[in-house]
Image (cartoon, rainbow, N blue to C red):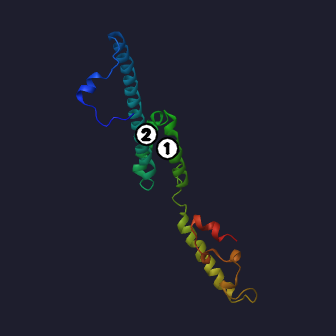
Amino acid sequence: MTLTRIGLGNFRRLPFPLPPAPEQDRIVSIVDEFMALCDRFDAARGERDRRVRFTITTLGRLTGQASESASFASSTTSALENISTLTAHSDQIRYLRQAVLALAVRGRLVRQDPSDVYFQSLLHRIHAASDLHRLKTKRHRSFGPSRMSDLSPRSRPIDVWPDYSVGGLSRHAY
């Protein structure tokens, strides 16, 4: 049965269960315990959020300063001084792993030899040597395809291969 409107007189006649005072006190006590538990959960979540922000900030400074050696040294010192804080909980470990991987990829985990050649300049040298080699051998070549377009896709030099997105590779596989 649905009532669309209840008048004040009808409302006053509705039964309303009211527990006795000791039962009300017990209910209030239980509600207070649950509210205290919720407060502890909220404080724990706030602490976790603070820990994660600290971890992300500290490791972000460490991985973001890859080109400035003074800042990198300072960030490294800070991270090492706080390593127990950065690894106190399992939710921080994934950020630490990401930072270590980023540093490894950039070659920042070991001392760098100033005489080492950067990858890009090494790649340019390889391309230049390859172009020079092609020019020298082009005059003497009397066999094989005469144009790059005559080469099979698998035997074309890298510089004439088309670029595809990673998602598009499956559509262009041979």
| 168 to 15, vertically: above or below | below
Residue under circle 2?
52
Label 2 near label 1: C-beta < 8 Å? yes
The reply to whether residue 169 is visible in this rendering is: yes
The residue that appears at 68% across and 89% down in the rendered structure is 139
Disc with the residue nearer the chain's start (1 vs 2): 2
| 70 to 52, vertically: above or below | below
Residue under circle 1?
95
Q: Nearer the viewer, residue 29 or 80?
A: 29
The residue that appears at 52% across and 47% down in the rendered structure is 98
Locate residue 39, reporting x and y percent.
37, 27
**Few, some or many residues within 10 Å of mark 1 (<14, 14–19, 20+):** some
Locate residue 59, reporting x and y percent.
45, 45
| 53 to 70, vertically: above or below | above
Q: Quadrant of the C terminus?
A: bottom right
Locate residue 91, reporting x and y percent.
50, 38
Q: Nearer the viewer, residue 85 or 49?
A: 49
Query: Left or right: where does residue 113 sit relative to residue 154?
Result: left
Judging from the image, what secondary structure is the residue with disc 1 in? helix
